[in-house]
Image (spheres, rainbow, N blue to C red):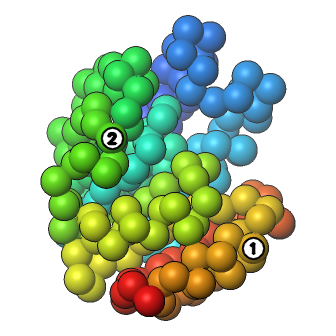
């Protein structure tokens, strides 16, 4: 890992710790394990997709996990963070500025009200069940785009439920930070 990337990740962790009591960016009980439970977890996307092309959209960004971490790992990649909570977007805008991430923007908006993004990549972590996320993927991904969804212990149940109304290709990547969790790589989304 480059020294500048490592320095930015350390600075990002410090910003989360500084702001967390006011905004609740991550669960207070998980703050002690911030680097492993949240930042290393989000960094898995950089390992799974080491050379992403085209714009990246992170929905329900919250404290920037995983989108801000993706922007740190890929400083040449345009990354848009979206969250409906204006306080969290204020944090994200501060973090983007302090980390010097010229490739990254943060927008306060509801996902369903955002104009279609035509994103090559879309990420979400701990946002909503998969059957509720797929319509957002359908709206915001480019036709040949890929979604990278970080899902917890119920990912298999969520996958089954989403396939009742949607067709898509799904590649399952086991999480390296939680053996019960997975990263779902979803593409070729179509209704029915």
Q: Residues within 10 Å of mark 1 (few under 14, many from 20)?
A: few
Q: Residues within 10 Å of mark 2 (few under 14, many from 20)?
A: few
- Secondary structure under tag 2 reads loop
Q: In the rendered image, is residue 5 in sight? A: no
Q: Quadrant of the C terminus?
A: bottom left
Q: In the rendered image, is residue 111 in sight? A: yes
92 to 124, vertically: above or below: above
Which percent across, then down, holds residue 52?
Answer: 31, 71
In this figure, which residue is indicated by the disc labeled 1?
A: 157
Specify whether 180 is left or right of 8: right
Kindly identify the residue that appears in the image at 37 percent across and 87 percent down.
190
Which percent across, then down, holds residue 78?
Answer: 20, 54
Kindly identify the residue that appears in the image at 22 percent across and 75 percent down.
142
Front-most of residues 105 and 102: 105
Give residue 70's mark.
none
Kindly identify the residue that appears in the image at 39 percent across and 85 percent down.
191
Q: In terms of sequence position, does the residue under pointer 2 or pointer 1 come before the other?
A: 2
Task: State how far apart marks 2 and 1 are (Cα).
Answer: 26 Å
Kindly identify the residue that appears in the image at 57 percent across and 53 percent down.
128
12 to 160, vertically: above or below: above
Which percent across, then down, holds residue 188?
Answer: 37, 88
Front-most of residues 123 and 43: 123
- Secondary structure under tag 1 reads helix
Front-most of residues 156 and 90: 156
Specify whether 86 is left or right of 119: right
In this figure, which residue is indicated by the disc labeled 2?
A: 110
């Amino acid at each position: 890992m480059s020294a500048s990337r490592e320095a930015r990740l350390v600075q990002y962790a410090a910003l989360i710790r500084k702001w967390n009591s006011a905004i609740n960016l991550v669960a207070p009980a998980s703050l002690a394990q911030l680097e492993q439970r949240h930042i290393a977890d989000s960094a898995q996307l950089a390992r799974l997709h080491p050379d992403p092309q085209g714009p990246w959209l992170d929905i329900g960004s919250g404290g920037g996990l995983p989108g801000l971490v993706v922007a740190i790992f890929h400083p040449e990649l345009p990354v848009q963070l979206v969250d409906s909570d204006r306080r969290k977007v204020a944090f994200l805008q501060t973090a983007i500025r302090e980390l010097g991430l010229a490739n990254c923007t943060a927008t306060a908006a509801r996902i369903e009200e955002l104009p279609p993004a035509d994103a090559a990549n879309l990420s979400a972590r701990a946002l909503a069940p998969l059957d509720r996320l797929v319509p957002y993927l359908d709206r915001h991904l480019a036709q040949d785009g890929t979604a990278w969804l970080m899902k917890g212990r119920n990912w298999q149940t969520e996958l089954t439920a989403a396939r009742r109304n949607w067709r898509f290709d799904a590649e399952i990547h086991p999480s390296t930070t939680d053996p019960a969790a997975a990263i779902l790589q979803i593409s070729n989304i179509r209704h029915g």
